[in-house]
Amino acid sequence: MLKRFNLTISILLFFPFFVTPGFTADKTKIENYLLEAQTYFDTAEYKKAIIQAKNAIKLDNTSARAYLLLAKSYAKTKNSPEAFKAYLTLEQIDPENNEYKLQVASFYLLGKNREEAEHRVKDILKKEPENIQALYLNAAVLSDKNESFDIIEKIYLNILKIDPKQAKAHLILAKFYANPKDFKKVEINLKKALEIEPDNITYYNELFGFYMANKQFGFAEAVLKDLVSKKPGDSEPLIIMGGFYAGQGEADKAKTTYLKAIDLNPKNPNSHMQLAKLLNSQKKTKEAESHIQKALDLAPDNLEIKNAYADFYFSNNDIAKAEAIADKILDKRPNFQPARVLKGKILAVKKEYDKAVEIFQSLVKDEPESDLLLFFLGSALFEKNDFDQAKPVLSKALEKNPNLFQAHSMMAEMYYRAGDLYLAQQNVEKVLNQFPKHYNANVLLGNIEMANKNHDPAKAIFKDMIDLEPDNPKAYFRLGIIYHSEKNYPEALKNYNQALGLNPNLMDVFTNLIGIYASQEQYQEAIRLCDEQLIKTSDTPIISSIILNLKANLLFATQNIDQGKILLKQSIEKNPAYTTPYLTLANIYQNENKITEAIDLYTALIEKRPDQPSPHNLIGTLYERQHKFDLAENHFKKALKIDPNYIPAANNLAFLYAELNKELNTALDLARQAKEQVGKLPAIMDTLGWVYYKKELYDSAAAEFMGCIEKEPDNPIYQYHLGLAYYKQGEYVKAETALKKALELQKDFQGSEEAKKVLGQL
């Protein structure tokens, strides 16, 4: 027994030597990992801190210290999901620790899981009713539940009762009081927050912003001056003050203030960037660029500054340089939002609208509540003329931020173009409520008044805008249009010439000016002006092309056909993508029965403008005249492939099928589509009626033909078609009347022989 006892004692004595060394080694390793993790965390090397915290957790997955360092490190790297997981684990390790519970509750609330947040907050407050952080969270939970203002207010007042030094509570109360517009309480609470933390720039900014929002600019300036005096060695308050002066239109004061900020801290790139922004707004581009370059020298890897440099080029229409910088940024950081936004704007300016829309849609998907991103998407759709999609997107942006005046401006423009003058005026007035002297908004309001035949108010607006911006041609042009419509040609010409004097390249102005002379048959004067304008714009082929086309039409009016044709050919040479001279010249060839030449011309236009449906449609009509029906059908189909809603091609193809008595169901679909889109247009109704006739739906056919005749009673084709429909219905007296009327109107129309044949059978 003794031997056995000694053996047991020996085992017990020696056991620590076999177990303890490994256990001690692990504890030492864990402690070393945690010390290294803490050191990395303290020196802001958070990724390394995460690695060492994880190493500690591998050896001890119940280490609260390790998980806390892991959670805090993830939070610093803005990896919220991983930080949340770590805090959840901490809550499981130590379920009685209210600090961990608070963190988990905060994450749940941010993730819109209010129930999980709420039960944790309630649990903490049962044990610690004066836990200030829990009270803050409780107020946030109740706000999310849309509880009454009084209940939430009591919580913040309770926080201040527990700790009167809670500046944050005063700030939140100030924001709450702003909603019912209790401005006195807002001001009191913001001032109290500042009293508690007089060095906190955030509270100065809030009080400053409050005064600015209420247009109390003197008080706003006083707040900034106080901030500058409190922080004499800090350049940031001076930068804010510079921005204030810039916003007030006091450019000299702003520049002086920014320069003081630069003198105070030459290594702060923000001072240079703000000064560059000011100088750029004053068109002092070289000086502005030098300050951007200085900012980049101070922070060469700062993507915000690089993007601002790209934006600088963009604002000065140097799109190539702007895009080059933006692309370099996106090569390094593909998801860098400011550069993606700028890239989208660049693509929109380059008229690559689909690509711009794709970028903005992606950005909105990531941040669906962003008013600015919604605005950028809506503006790209607006520029694309996709108003059906632009309107709801811009409306949503305005729901988020009713003060987005640019969105109101675009909405006004869209409603104006759609002929909804009431909604156009509503939106433009919202712009003018914010900016009474906004030039473009005033011009649009003038256009609306003009469309409503309110010429005197429109004139007054345009004259005010001329006084406001005498070097802007837009108001002169619009004023000229009013006088033109009133046949006050001297005043119209005076204003058109003013506009052209400011910008000789304004072809809409020049075209209207020529129109006045043409309407009075002063063709030689109009031709002389075209020649003068050609000299002024000789270095702009696109403009020259338009003027040559105008001059050609003036020559046609004087029966100088051959010279006119020469000018149209010159117009095409100057700008091969300009469609009008092709169409005009082809029309002349058709009148001269030179169908082959017209077809060749349309073929050349198709090569230059493959995106246009009209040349295919026109060439199709010519092939139809030549009875080359397969070629005609092919070109009508190509036009519809380019634009499925192109009504002329849909109508022509439907009529061709009816004439050939083929694909009548397709013809009916096309004809109905055309009528749905353009309404009761005789040419469209006649096609639909003819398709019905071919499908032996004579009642429907007669109804369409009667609708055509109501609008154009002297068209022999419509009378002829109606006569045929009546004949098939057995309405012989009506058929005879219609067919005779057709032949009275024109003896040799297409179908006249058939009309005579039917009449002979009656």
Image (spheres, rainbow, N blue to C red):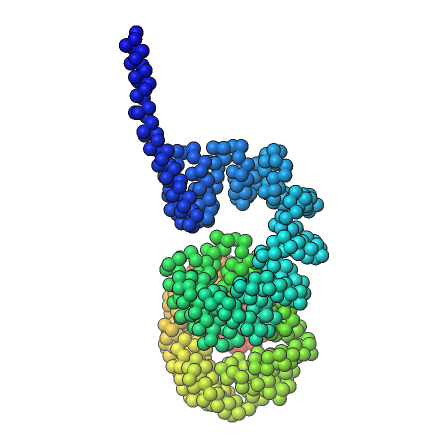
Where residue 247 sits, quadrant-wise, is bottom right
Q: Position of residue 537 (x, y in %)?
A: 45, 85
Q: Quadrant of residue 601?
A: bottom left
Q: Is residue 558 visible?
A: no
User: Where residue 135 sits in the image (x, y, percent)?
Assistant: 62, 41
Please tell me how many numbered marks the rendered image carries. Answer: 0
Q: Is residue 19 above or below residue 521?
A: above
Q: Residue lying at the far top in this picture: please name it.
A: 1
* Residue found at x 43% / y 46%: 41
Which of the image's four quarters has the N terminus? Answer: top left
Q: Is residue 625 above or below residue 113?
A: below
Q: Is residue 203 left or right of residue 585?
A: right
Res 232 → quadrant: bottom right
Residue situated in front as seen by the camera: 360 or 214: 214
| Quadrant for the C terminus in the image | bottom right
- The location of residue 554, given as percent across then percent down, is 50, 87
Q: Residue at x 29, y 14 (%)?
A: 7
| Residue positioned 46% across, 44% down in the render | 72
Image coords of residue 347 (percent x, y): 44, 65
Q: Nearer the viewer, residue 411 or 50?
A: 50
Depth check: give the residue in front, 336 or 696: 336
The answer, for residue 336, to whether it is visible in the render is yes
Q: Is residue 512 left or right of residue 292?
A: right
Q: Residue at x 49, y 33 (%)?
A: 94
